[in-house]
Image (cartoon, grey):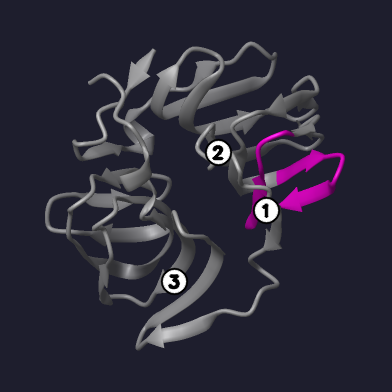
Amino acid sequence: MYINADLKQRAAVRFNASDWVASPMPGVERRMLDRVGEEVARATSIVRFAPGSAFSAHAHDGGEEYIVLDGTFQDEDGDFPTGCYVRNPPTTSHTPAATDGATILVKLHQFDPEDRTSVRLDTNQATWDQPAIGVERLLLHEDPREQVVMESWAPGTRRHLDATGGLEVFLLSGELSDGTDSIEAWDWLRLPPGSVFEAEAGPDGARLWFKSGHLSHVADGPA
């Protein structure tokens, strides 16, 4: 299965224009943003867990990275409420569940094989910095391959993000426009290496998750 697999191309998926697709586990549905592979795949997805649903215990040979968008996600390491950011590096395993339901943005099989850094961060409890007027910023993860950040932009804020190594943007709330696309809550945008990203927050501001630099280290899948 190949979905938005050509990393040389700009890609955008609008949440309200996509559909939920059933997973192999009852009560678990996905909206696929990009994918190279079948059930075990290099993939970026929004995954919705109905109350009481769960996945069987499994290992993440290629790593797993997610942010909780709604509800509370759970595994052996505890409860992760809305706003939590988690990195489970290659070789880790868990049994995920959502007693009361949850929705997550998750990226699978996209780690450096040697990465062993775990992250468990509640962004609601963290200290954010202010790199510019109208901007609050929280660094989630950084290594030689990539940087992962959350930012909140005040209404009308214009901002330049480094997209030379590729960039993925997921809008958590609000609205922003980069002159080509206007994106809203839970929309996803991917820019190829060598791009420029200049964007402006809408009248209600914007909160976004973004990852940069990582696409320079990934071989393209088939278009």
What amino acid is at disc 3? Ser
Which numbered tag is attached to residue 106? 2
Counting from the top left corner in percent of width and height, residue 31 is at: 46, 27
Residue 83 on the magenta span: yes
Labels 2 & 3 near each other (Cβ < 8 A): no
Residue 77 drawn in magenta: yes
Tell which tag, 2 or 1, sits nearer the viewer.
Answer: 1
Quarter of the figure with the C terminus: top left
Of 19 and 160, the residue lying toward us: 160
The amino acid pointed to by label 2 is Val
Q: Quadrant of the N terminus?
A: top left
**Mark toward the start of the polypeptide (3 vs 1):** 1
- At x 32%, y 75%, the residue is 155
Q: Please tell me which residue is depicted at 32% across the width and 38% down the height of the picture.
A: 14
Within 10 Å of disc 2 (Cα), the crowding (few <14, some 14-19, many 20+) is many
The spot of residue 160 in percent (x, y) is 24, 71
Residue drawn at x 44%, y 56% as measured from the top left = 146
Q: Which residue is mark 3?
A: 152
Please state which amino acid type lies under the numbered disc 1: Thr
Describe residue 218's horizontal placement relative to residue 58 as left or right. Answer: left
> Magenta part of the protein: which range?
72-91
Q: Earlier in the sequence, mark 2 or mark 3?
A: 2
CA neighbours of label 1 inside 10 A, class few (<14), some (14 to 19), many (20+)? few
Q: What secondary structure is marked by label 2?
A: strand
Q: CA distance from mark 2 to mark 1?
A: 17 Å
Corner quadrant of residue 6: top left
Task: Kindly state the secondary structure of the residue where label 3 is placed.
Answer: strand
Label number found at residue 117: 1
